[in-house]
Amino acid sequence: MIALLLFWFFFGITLLQTKQREFLAQKSSQDWLLDSLGLCMQGIIIPFLQIVLGLHLYSWLLPQANNCLDIDPWLSFIISFVVVDYLYYWHHRLLHQRFFFPLHAVHHTVSQMDMLGTSRNTLWSSFFLPYLWINSLMLYLLKDFHGYSLGIFLTCLLDLWRHSSLNVQKESILYHLLNPWLILPEDHAYHHSRSQLGNFAANLKIWDRLHGTYRVSDNTIQPIGIILNMNLIQKLFYPFSLNKTQ
């Protein structure tokens, strides 16, 4: 629910931009439906399942482990914001391998960077995201989950931001403070370009730098989004008949 509230808050901010309003006016009815269903999945259903997993599945599998992990909130924040981010980096790279890409391809059909496309995906692909399983397990294990929850909150916030066109001015102090370590919207826009050659991290740029997958986004306009020759039902449920065109 927090993710959904955050979305509407920042979506309202993006509407102040003329470019964003033009993007929304150009969005097709199919894209509106894909984005809306994806938002409901990641903003409502997935958080609900995290609660169900914590209350039922893990309590059944690990009945003695509830609240057993007694660590400082700052350390649980590091696990949430840094360690899980590193796991996501490798998960994301795996999704860009030929065999697994159909699970992720629909997300790359966004043709413009706007927050509505943040959750665009095949409906059940969210079940393969590490956030669902790891976060629910950690919240079940932790005695004090506030630090870990803060990491979840910031990760969700940055996910919305990097899929927007709310770029930080490169001449600003804020840009020079954030750019060395944080994935910015222009970094993720490069990832959504048709080359898809790098910038796989979610929060921290260090993972792409460490493994040689970081790509600097220059000032040239690159085409964003791939075109999938499949109908709406295939995109929502069965993307394996993948026939990609640029």
Image (spheres, rainbow, N blue to C red):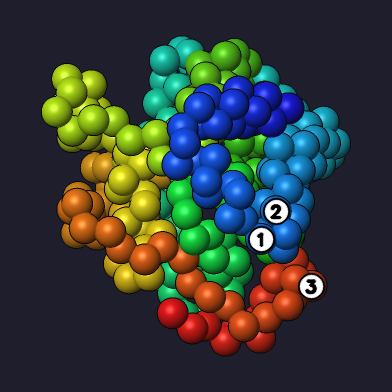
* Callouts 1 and 2 close, C-beta under 8 Å: yes
Secondary structure under tag 2 reads helix
Question: Circle 3 sits in a helix, a strand or a loop, which is it?
Answer: helix
Q: Is residue 212 left or right of residue 229?
A: left
- Amino acid identity at mark 3: Ile
Q: Nearer the viewer, residue 187 or 96?
A: 187
Q: Earlier in the sequence, mark 3 or mark 2?
A: 2
Residue under numbered circle 3: 233
What secondary structure is marked by label 1? loop
Marks 3, 2: nearer the viewer: 2
Rounded to the nearest angstrom, the CA distance separating label 3 from label 2 is 14 Å
Q: Where is residue 177 in the image (x, y as percent from the top left)?
A: 19, 23
**Which three-letter amino acid code belongs to the residue tagged 1?**
Ser
Q: From where the camera sits, is residue 64 visible?
A: yes
> Which residue corresponds to the image point at 39% horizontal and 34% vertical from the top-left?
166
Image location (x, y in percent) of residue 140: 69, 28
Up the image or down, 198 lies above or below 164; here it is below
Distance between mark 1 and mark 2 Cα atoms: 6 Å
Q: Name the residue under label 2.
A: 32
Percent position of residue 69, x then y: 58, 22
- Dot 3 crowding, Cα within 10 Å, few <14, some 14–19, many 20+: few
Q: Sequence order check: which comes first, mark 3 or mark 1?
A: 1
**Residue placed under numbered mark 1 in the picture:** 28
Q: In this rendering, would 209 be left or right of 237?
A: left
Q: Is residue 139 visible?
A: no
| Quadrant of res 144 | top right
Foreground tag (3 vs 1): 1
Q: Residue at x 45, y 22 (%)?
A: 77
Q: What residue type is labelled 2?
A: Trp
Residue at image point 59% right, 26% down: 12
Q: Nearer the viewer, residue 156 or 139?
A: 156
Residue 195 pos. (x, y %): 32, 70
